[in-house]
Amino acid sequence: MVDLSQTKSAEYAGPAPTLASRLAPYALPIFLILMIVVAGVISPAFLSANNISNMLLQAAPLGIVVIGQAFVIILRGLDLSVSSVMATSAVIATGFSGVNGDVIPILLVAVGIGVATGVVNGLLVTKRSVSPFLATLATMIVLQGFRFAYTQGAPSGNVPPLFRTLGSATWNGIPYNMMLLVVLAAVFWVLLAKTRFGREVYITGGNPTTARLLGINADRVTIIGYVISGGLAAIAGLVLSGYVGIVDNWVGRGFELDSIVAAVMGGISLAGGRGGIIGGLFGAAVLIVVFNAVLLFGLPVQFQIIIKGLVIVAAAAFYVRRSH
Amino acid sequence: MLKLTGISKGFTGVQALSSINFDVRAGEIHALVGENGAGKSTTIKIIAGAYKPDAGTLEFDGRQVHWARPADAKAAGIHVIYQEFVLFPHLTVAENIFLGHERRGAFGMIDHARTRRDAADLLGKLGVDIDPDRLVSELTVADQQMVEISKALVHKVKLLILDEPTAVISGREAELLFARLAVLKAEGVAIVYVSHRLEEIFQIADRVTVFKDGQHVVTTDIGNVDRNRLIAYMVGRDLKDIFPPKPDTDAPGKVVLKAENITVEGRVRNAGIELRAGEITALAGMVGAGRTEFAMGIFGGLPISSGTVTIDGERLSNVSPALSIARGVGFVTEDRKGQGLAMQLDVAANISAADLGGVTSGGLLDRRRENEIARHEIDNYRIACRGPATPVATMSGGNQQKVIVARWARTSRKVLILDEPTRGVDVGAKTEIYRIMRQLADAGIAILMISSELPEVVGMADRVVVMREGVVSGELAGAAITEAAIMSLATQHPVREAAE
Amino acid sequence: MSATVSSGSSGFSRTLKKNQGVFVVLALLVLLLIFGSVVSDRFRTSNNFLNILEQSTGLALVSLGQTLTILTGGIDLSVGSMISLLSTVTSGTINGDVSMVAPVVVGILLLGLVIGLVNGLLIIWLKVHPLIVTLGTGAVLQGIVLLYSLGPAGKVPRGFTFLAYGKVLGIPLGAIFVVVVFALVGAFLTYFRLGRYIFAVGDDDAGALLMGLPRAKVILTVYGFSGFCCAMAAIYLTARFGVGQPYTGLNYTLASITPVVVGGTLLSGGKGGVLGTLLGVYLISLLNNVLNFMDVSTHYQLIAQGLIVIAAVSIYVERRKKV
């Protein structure tokens, strides 16, 4: 008897990878390098140590938020509440007496709020099947209300010096906040790419029904994803408060969109189950370079927003084409 | 009326149709048969303009045509009743029936009263009593099917295609459908009728065409073939070569899983079953009879409102997938893409998915071990792929199915449940899967196979449990397992002898 | 069967049958009215109610367009930027010149329509989810309006404010306009094929394609109309504030979604309607009004609004799977 499974299946194994499909995963790093080269040629100031150090300083808070956003988006979600968490934790940072002794309580309170927000988001999404967009939108508004009520509209007070150092100082040109980002990125990269929990995140995000039938507690995995996002957003808020120095109610505004744009650009699919932290961080790097280049080229700052808008649509369209 | 010449169509990793020819005449009922995955659905979608063929020509009503979209085929007079209904759950019955052909009055405004009246008329013509004002989501599956059928009667069609219309209806409703088809045929409509139920085909069809593995096998007048001949065409070889021999011991194995009084809200009532070590038990019945829900209830994939599951003497009243897996029960789902595979992940990750603990060491996933296991299973099950890192999305249905079976065979020490294990799988892979199932049974595992394919049930099962409308309607064993006996229990209508 | 057929013959009762959300919102409205009357005497005055109607005009218009995009299973996140842009350009180009009013109003309405159509075209061509597309175009439009002006631009002639503050028989013009427009759109959804197809596309996008329904036309219609609604809202808000500025629309993106979901329209599409949205708008305006009377600061009003969204979406649990 002829063994059909062998003869038949050979042609089923799919087309051999083409050069283009081999290069596709590196599209973003290549794009980033090209942009840096072009920007450096047009404006030599771009590659000055000072400017690079400056970009790294700006990149760190965004990078920290993107890590959390990556977990949520891989889980088929989306976290709009990150900006509100950031602003709230920044307000908390100034809410004490502004000395270094307050750092621990500030950290506990801020991260606590971030984690609590994540729990609420996760519960709404899993137990009440509210769409992530609406759930995180609602918590964002509620948290904003609490923040306004707490500050009575005008926050005042000082950021402890330690946060100032963390947020804006450098060591041999390397910002401390960038070191923090690298540490956090490494920890969460291991969690996502190398542990059982990380695999459960991918399976749940790819298909929650499959996950459930595999005995994975999909709800718990999802809630933890939102908790990670909320907690990291709180830390990013503290870092950002140290960077800007003066805190108002809107610190972190725009980070919800920037972090989503960075993640999508980095190949993290909004359909879930696909992408990783490194891609998301490359996406964040591209955004920061674009923002910086706009200013350096003497373009009006508004172009930052316009380019951001064009980039997110183009990136999403690019990945839609690739997945077909 | 319709003529397909040299039509080919491929998808990622699969050649679904290779150069097939097919024609339908006005005023005939042309049956299209073949096993799951033979290319029937793809052909229908090409005729309906939902897919574009890679090669070949399509002639309709004497002219060569190229459909850019389904709307074109529809406008030309082709109507398809898909197996997966195209019904809009939040619209009413009447609105669904006339969608795209709204009854309109002054200023082009929709005339709701007339829509309802005409819908009631149409349903009356079909002989069913369905309130046109109800939302489609509130109807039973059988009623939804009748609504789907009535959509075909709204406007003059030249070619009507029905894909498994009787999968969810039976008896009286099926007779109503056949009577209506006879009227349409007399009016000169060309009808393509796809069905698994061969006795129906002998009852109503004029000609029959057989597909196998994406290729055209034969087209002939129905009078020229008998039932066995047709099956041989569909399967491509004698049945005895496909199914591994059943063991001839008469001693039934030890009961390893016993489910009692299982009730799944709205789908299954007080159903029970016993699965024995070393045996293949088939769960048969019509689509919608509650088989999948029953098995899911046993596994813990669906909440049960009553009942107990006893595994190896341990009584569980609160089953969950995690618990079942821990007790050595596995579930190969019917819906590979929707419930079985993690489509974004590769072969290795899919095989280890039910046993992540087994590939974790020191808190981290051991990718090397995962790959070793995958390589072993790829050899073991002859999975055609480029290695452990092949994304499952690029593989054929048969090989995807082997990946899932490999996954569950590793963790299922006691019971393996397989829901329609050969759906959308070519005959080669099918033979492989049957062989694997028998091997597992011989190794002492209790197998529960849900199947709608009667030859498969008869060929594989040592014991058959039949369900009808949510309850277990009977059990057959040994020589008593025949297609007629199963159909009789599944429908409680004495089955007509096919092809006199 | 004829008995069941004759019942529920009017479009209005059809709407009710299909959207139980309307009942929920109506009940909440009544509760709030009673509660408000207890809390404050001034609440009960007709002046206060007219005030509420007048203030809700802008939100009502934006939410109307948003309802249609959400009914198709999409969303329009560019409405805030559209309003900012259109409003700033309105007062910037009129710039106090009475003779410019008519051409500018017509031009702005057209511009809104065109921007909306661009959204629709991008969604169709790029096959990217509307959420991302409109997020992107929203950012682009916000950048453009800031390039146009960093602050309030131009001014409008005194007579122009009549659009916002004018009254007919003592009822605010805007409130009457809103009811008329909502009724027209409601009739469109109930009595016209394209309206029916909006529900079908939202219910089952792939099925709509298989049925040969004009999906592209549906998408263009709803996003074009959303842009048009933003233009109407922008003109109204410009009249109300006397000037347009680049952050006029800022809060409307999210605010426009609230009444839609509160009114029972599913974010996943296919179910709901404009009546629920209108009641949702009134509910939110009334809630803010009652909270004002209770001397609750706007900060807590935000919290209340967020909680209402959470409550609403938790009540109407969305279906997970089609039939």
Image (cartoon, rainbow, N blue to C red):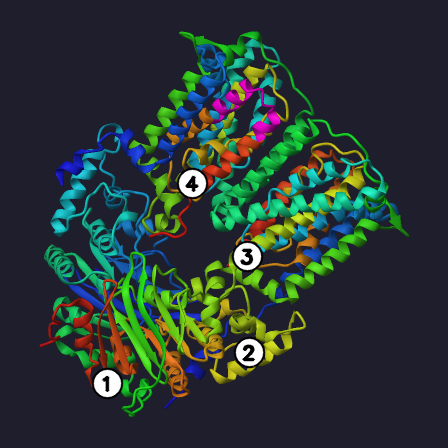
Q: Which residue is mark 1?
A: B478
Task: Tell me the chain of label 3.
Answer: A
Which of discs 2 and 1 lies nearer the camera? The answer is 1
Tell me the chief SS of the magenta region.
helix
For the residues labelled 3 and 4, the Cα–Cα distance comes to 22 Å
**In contact (CB < 8 Å): disc 2 and disc 1:** no
Q: In the rendered image, which residue does mark 4 sit on?
A: C315
Q: Quarter-wise, where is residue C98 in the image?
A: top right
Q: How far, Cα to Cα, is label 2 from label 3?
A: 28 Å
The mark lying in front, picked from 1 and 3, is 3
Magenta segment boundaries in residue numbering: C284-302
| Kind of residue sitting beneath label 1 | Gly
Q: Which residue does the numbered mark 3 point to in the structure image? A: A220
Q: CA distance from mark 1 to mark 3?
A: 46 Å
The amino acid type, in three-letter code, at marker 4 is: Ile
User: What percent of the width, then of the height, locates residue B327?
Assistant: 46, 74
CB contact under 8 Å: marks 1 and 4: no
Assign a secondary structure to mark 3.
Answer: helix
| Residue at image mark 2 | B374
Q: Say if C308 sits above or below B307 in the image.
A: above
Tag 1 and tag 4 share a subunit: no
With A254 as the anchor, is B86 left or right in this view? left
